[in-house]
Image (cartoon, rainbow, N blue to C red):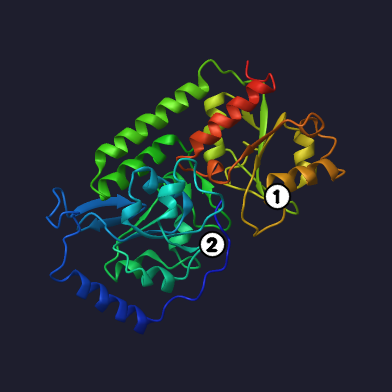
Amino acid sequence: MLSTATPAPIRTAALLAAGLLLLTACGEGGSTGAADGKKAEGFPLTLKNCGRTVTVKAPPQQAVSVDQGSTEILLSLGLADRLAGTATWSDPVMKGLEKANAGVERISENRPSSEKVLDKEPDFLSASFASTLAKGGVAPREQFEKLGVPTYISPADCVGKDNSGGGDGARTAPLTMDSVYTEVRELAQVFDVPERGDALVKKLRARVDKATDGIDASDTSLLYWFSDSKAPYLAGCCGAPGVITRELGAKNVFDDTHDEWPQISWETVADRNPDVLVIGDLSRTMQTAESAEKKIEFLESNPVTKTMDAVRNRRYVLLSGQAMNPTIRTVEGLERVAAGLRDFGLAG
């Protein structure tokens, strides 16, 4: 689920032109982008990314990541020293990355303006969601590309997904962790640290195998609630929660919708009566009932929801927002849901 904060107006054409001159001047006679000033092997590097051809002339040294999921991948790859700024945070940084993250400027808690991004003079821009680098987001990809700034969007948000409609898009094919692993490896390739990408993917795969070892939740139904109590955003069949559900062999009570995060009435939720509620515990304050505490308070006081089996038995699993998005933290989500089902005696 992506941020819905309203971005600042896009930089004017004159200012963009000035930025282009600045970036061009910085590139003339300077470093090729390799850490030692020598041209890195395999560069310029060309990738196909979310329907666009992206060319990176040299490993980035001044990158900006405008979504938390993308940022945490880069930090996990040991690239904090090559990040000039980050933005759009829904949760505290992933455990183990606190020190690395503390050394990187956070230019905005929500979506930044294009001015703030360009002020960092980026040589690469990464995002988790297509809407972040589109009209109504920070700025369209082509706007940065005209300035010579290559852009990258997580394949998990475009492969097998239709983002042309409203809301958070709809899945035309179920998401798999392979899209996340592809993002890890491609970003590692862009920054010329491919061995780090391979190592991270290996660790993530091992965690998935450990979390699902011997589990059978085929008789268990789940509901994933990301945010908002008035018109709740609940997971459809095939995004990151779908990955978790399929790995556990469980059932999502709303697996009959391909929308990423449809808004569904509480009456419909109560009618489907899931065994377990997987609840987003967000630190942001953009919508109603962001924290798990507020969500549980609502569930246990609302006349429609308080009689549900999961509520009466307090079968709650709490996840970070990022664990419910298609990121490396989807693995964290899988681990927590698996542990919760085992604790509830619902894991076979």
The C terminus sits in image quarter = top right
Q: Residues within 10 Å of mark 2 (few under 14, many from 20)?
A: many
99 w.r.t. 118: above or below: above
Tag 2's secondary structure? loop
Can residue 156 be seen here?
yes
- Residue lying at the far bottom in this picture: please name it: 14
12 w.r.t. 246: above or below: below
Tag 1's secondary structure? loop
Q: Residue at x 35, y 30 (%)?
A: 202
110 w.r.t. 41: above or below: below
Can residue 238 be seen here?
no
Residue 127 horizontal/vertical position (percent): 42, 55
First in sequence: mark 1 or mark 2?
2
Residue 50 horizontal/vertical position (percent): 37, 52
Q: Quadrant of residue 123?
A: bottom left
Taking depth in this image into account, of 305 and 252 the one nearest to the observer is: 305
- Residue lying at the far right in this picture: please name it: 303
- The residue that mark 1 highlights is 232
The three-letter code of the residue at mark 1 reads: Pro
- The residue that mark 2 highlights is 110
Taking depth in this image into account, of 158 and 89 the one nearest to the observer is: 89
* For residue 267, side relative to residue 170 (left or right): right
Residue 240 horizontal/vertical position (percent): 52, 39
Q: Quadrant of residue 323?
A: top right
